Amino acid sequence: MNPHTNVTGLKLTDRVMYRLTPPHMEAVLDQPVLVLNRLWQAVNVIGARRAFALLSNGHASVIHHQEDDFRVFNLLDWVDFSLSNPPLELMDQVRTPRTLIRLPRVILLAHFDRLPCKELKLTRTNVFERDKETCQYCGRAFKREELNLDHVIPRDHGGKTTWENIVCSCIKCNSRKANRLPHQANMRLIHKPVRPKWRPVITLVLGHKERERWKDFLDLAYWNVELED
């Protein structure tokens, strides 16, 4: 038997994951997959499409866990496991012309053993997350497109673009404050802006379902990921 072919006769190449016709398949392949380094420390979140490429190239293995049972599969074994343990949900499966494969939720890198740096980047997205999409002057929550970033101490007054000087502000409050210090506009901050402590990307951008699914792998003492807009 060809070493790259499993019991179903499926040849596992990178391209096999893209011979897909159901309209929902793009959404399935865009779903998040948690990446662990070879020391089992969480280091990244990637799309399922990229995860399958890493699995196909032998750069990663699938981790399947149920309660206290943790099992590691290469891609060929994962396909066979999927046949005997088919997923129940439509969004948990990838269909190829010959078979059905469970969507991996966690993968283990074969060689990478480093950790991301602990510095959380100062970006618009991260400021919105820190301030919980709430205007720091009036205290009301807004949609992101209805928020601006405000320099508490304006740049014309020597203010710098730092975590300690940038806050979310609604358009109305931003216009009212203009190029003044808060007290000059008779305004007060509801919270003092601070540099956030590093924390997993999952707590910033993913929902409750993913956090619950990955909670056994998220060691807050070890990892952090830089976020970008």
Image (cartoon, rainbow, N blue to C red):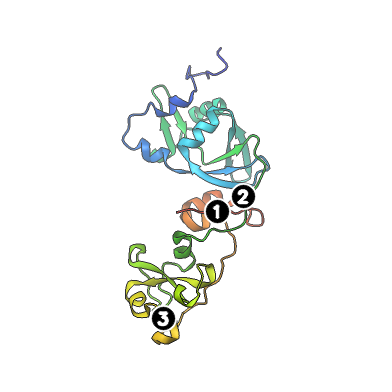
Determine crowd level at label 1: few under 14, some 14-19, many 20+ residues with C-alpha closer than 10 A: some
Q: Amino acid at mark 1?
A: Glu
Disc 3 from disc 1: Cα separation = 32 Å
| Residue 180: assigned label | 3
Amino acid type of the residue that numbered disc 2 sits on in the rendered structure: Pro
Q: Is residue 176 above or below residue 201?
A: below
In this figure, which residue is indicated by the disc labeled 1? 226
Which residue does the numbered mark 2 point to in the structure image?
Answer: 116
The N terminus appears in which quarter of the rendering? top right
Q: Position of residue 215 (x, y in %)?
A: 57, 52
Upstream in the sequence, badge 3 or badge 1? 3
Tags 2 and 1 touching, CB below 8 Å: yes
Closer to the N terminus: mark 2 or mark 3?
Answer: 2
Q: Nearer the viewer, residue 79 or 185?
A: 185
The quarter holding residue 113 reads: top right
SS category of the residue bearing label 3: loop
Viewer-proximal residue among 102 and 183: 183
Q: Residue at x 44, y 81 (%)?
A: 181
The residue under label 3 is which amino acid type? Arg
Coordinates of residue 158 in the picture (x, y in percent): 50, 75
